[in-house]
Amino acid sequence: MTSDPHTNDRVAQSVARKDDHIRLALEQRRGPASSNDFDYVEPVHHALDGIDIDEVTLDVDVDGWVWPAPIYINGMTGGTDNAERANRALAIAARENGMPIASGSLSIALDAPETAPSFRVIREENPNGLVFANLGAGRSPDDAARAIDLLEANALQLHLNAVQETIMREGSRGFSTWLRDVERIVEAAEVPVIIKEVGFGLSGRVLRQLRDLGVRIADVSGAGGTSFARIEDERSGGGYAYMHHYGQSAVNCLLDAPADFPAVLASGGVRSPLDVIRALALGARAVGVAGPFLVAAMDGDEETAVNETQRWLTQTRQLLALLGAHTPAAATGIDVLLRGRVREFSELRGIDPAAFARRTYN
């Protein structure tokens, strides 16, 4: 560490926070999967729609950029020994199965270079794969360039986490410059910039703001999965329990997304390959998964992570064949029923639920 005691204290706090995040996220993930808004999206089964699985290809087009799989390993962690172990296993899984992978926030590596190896392992274990660096809004274009260089990244995930920062005891309390900060980074970055939330959702209005800034890819990252509001509340000693389920789900964000946004991705609360199909059916170009893969990496080993990610790809392909979709993009043509609170959200936002149920109606 540096010789500045204030900097050392800040770095030590960040390192402890990263391990807290892993521990508390795993506590949320272990045990039965909880219900969320994906359960209110029901694909209509047409018994004669199935095709041969060999007819299904998994490539996806993300704003003219071809990814080899419709599932990506979303940004999670880094900065500690535990995080390095997770990142190594996940990077190997990404390499073996052709999945894109994102790092956790690189802020700690920029401020404390001694922690950089726990992130760099992602590129070392996956030298030819699609790797996304991750950084929070509020950092400078120079910081963004350093983060990209650290991982020789193919893209930058720039995350918006105002809710998390509000609850975090050592978090930021100033967000008024974020829109301009995003614009500056998008203008300066030499790789695609993917704007994402951290589990509270990107509304249609925010997506329109981002589009107008020149953002072409966004991950809505909705509520319903790992709750960083709950994690930071537990770290801070409580008092914010009413915020644990705050935000919009990925399902509702996809429904709310403007039709002319170039490429919308989805994550947050994705528990199974069926949820992947549901997100694709609502317009996601690709789907990010974090919690289930973190459990595989931390509770098992590298082989466990490889096998789990392979299972997700295999079963996603099987479900596409079952539904008669030759590609992930073709899932936007399947009939889906929007029920319960998702239907209510749609109606309140002026979206016609029946249109999704009658896509193949004749």
Image (cartoon, rainbow, N blue to C red):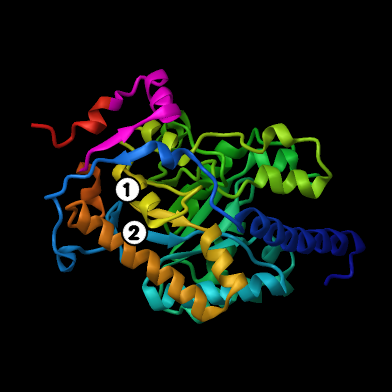
Left or right of 283? Residue 303 is right
Q: Quadrant of the N terminus?
A: bottom right
Q: Does the image show residue 293?
A: yes
Q: What residue is rendered at 73% in x and 36% in y?
A: 241
In the image, 339 versus 168, the foreground residue is: 339
What's under tag 2, amino acid-wise? Pro
Q: Is residue 11 above or below residue 218?
A: below
Quadrant of residue 142 within the rendered picture: bottom right
Look at the image and give the residue range highlighted in magenta.
Answer: 334-353
Q: What residue is rendered at 59% in x and 64% in y?
A: 146
In the image, 246 versus 52, the foreground residue is: 52
What's under tag 1, amino acid-wise? Leu
* Of the image marks 2 and 1, the number of the one nearer the N terminus: 2
In the image, 324 versus 48, the foreground residue is: 48
Secondary structure of residue under mark 1:
helix
Left or right of 52? Residue 182 is right
How far apart marks 2 and 1 lie (CA) works out to: 9 Å
Q: Are marks 2 and 1 in contact (CB under 8 Å)?
A: yes
Secondary structure of residue under mark 2:
loop
**Disc 2: CA contacts within 10 A as few (<14), some (14-19) or many (>=20):** many
Left or right of 68? Residue 130 is right
Which residue lies most toward the left here?
362
Say whether residue 342 is magenta.
yes
Left or right of 106? Residue 19 is right
Q: Does the image show residue 259?
A: no
Q: Which residue is mark 1?
A: 280
- From the top left corner, tell me how far across and down residue 59 is, in percent: 26, 62
Q: What residue is rendered at 24% in x and 56% in y?
A: 320
- From the top left corner, tell me how far across and down residue 339 is, in percent: 37, 30
Say whether residue 310 is magenta.
no
Q: Which residue is mark 2?
A: 70
**Disc 1: CA contacts within 10 A as few (<14), some (14-19) or many (>=20):** many
